[in-house]
Amino acid sequence: MKEQDLDGEWLTIGQLSQRSGITERNLRAYQARGLLPPPLVKARTGYYGPEHRARLELVKDLQAEGVKLETIKRLFDTTGGSTEQVLTFVRSLRALFGEPERAIVTAGELAERFGTDDPALLKKAERTGLLRKVDDDQYEEVLPQLTAAGASVVELGIPLDRSLDAAAKLLQHADGIAKLFVELFLDEVWKPFDASGRPDEGWPALHETVKDLSTLSTDALLAVVAHAVRERLDVVFGRDLARTVRTAKDAGTAQP
């Protein structure tokens, strides 16, 4: 290696650690796992250049988007120069299905909203995943829309305990529905695109497909839930109506 190759942009692991904010230990771990290319070695000292810093920034960005290190490694192994496209794609996915803005509320505010200060119900809301305790008196609303819906249900006269049970079941079913749509996307859209080598010209169409799938999955879910509720109401009230008719008939028959 020529001396000029090490000028300016090349850093030792200590310098790279200071500049990137990543500990030397983690830098070595990234390299061992294949997340970071090996350094250029001169006189027994490893040097890291612009490519290493760019790769580190991608790792940090992908981690910030919630992508696990194992997944990042697979992305690096298969994407080649299109890794930035993958990052953009991950960000667009999170924007489409992103989490709502969370709010911090006090135990007193929750008690006023739900009409009870029962600590057991707060614990249950935590177990359900609606609340996350911040400190002794503050909670983070993990799903503000669902929490607001729960408060509206309580206003209708349904006990909070039953509302929390319903929320837990709703979240459980939602996970299964999400799995169905994600598997559909992976099998029918992502895997063929991946098998084709993820061509640069194919990314825009992939983004549009994800947007369309987001809208279609929401519309389909609302339609299915509405249909299921109608069917369930027909069954329940049909039974009650039949029971009422039979009771009235029996009473009329019993009369002298």
Image: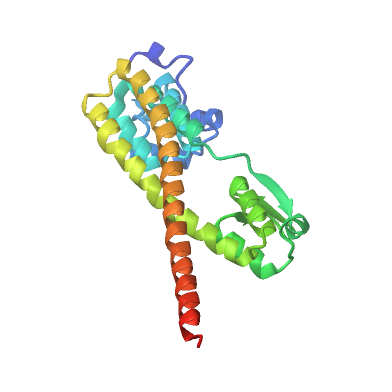
Q: Is residue 47 above or below residue 177?
A: above
Residue at 36% over, 26% down: 209
Q: Nearer the viewer, residue 144 or 7?
A: 144
Seen in the image, is 105 located left or right of residue 243?
right
Q: Nearer the viewer, residue 187 or 236?
A: 236
Residue 12 in sight here: no
Q: Is residue 188 above or below residue 49?
A: below
Residue at 48% over, 68% down: 240
Q: Residue furthest front?
A: 256
Q: Nearer the viewer, residue 144 or 42?
A: 144
- Where residue 246 appears, as percent x and y from the top left, is 44, 75
- Where residue 97 appears, as percent x and y from the top left, is 48, 36
Q: Nearer the viewer, residue 82 or 201?
A: 201
Q: How many marks?
A: 0
Q: Residue furthest top?
A: 4
- Where residue 123 appears, as percent x and y from the top left, is 62, 65
- Where residue 87 appears, as percent x and y from the top left, is 42, 27
Residue 63 in sight here: yes
Specify how the rendered protein is coloured.
rainbow
* Image quadrant assignment for residue 164: bottom right
Q: Residue furthest bottom?
A: 256
Residue at 66% over, 53% down: 152
Q: State the quadrant of the N terminus.
A: top left
Residue at 35% over, 24% down: 206
Seen in the image, is 167 located left or right of residue 6?
right
Q: Is residue 234 above or below residue 184?
A: below
* Image quadrant assignment for residue 217: top left
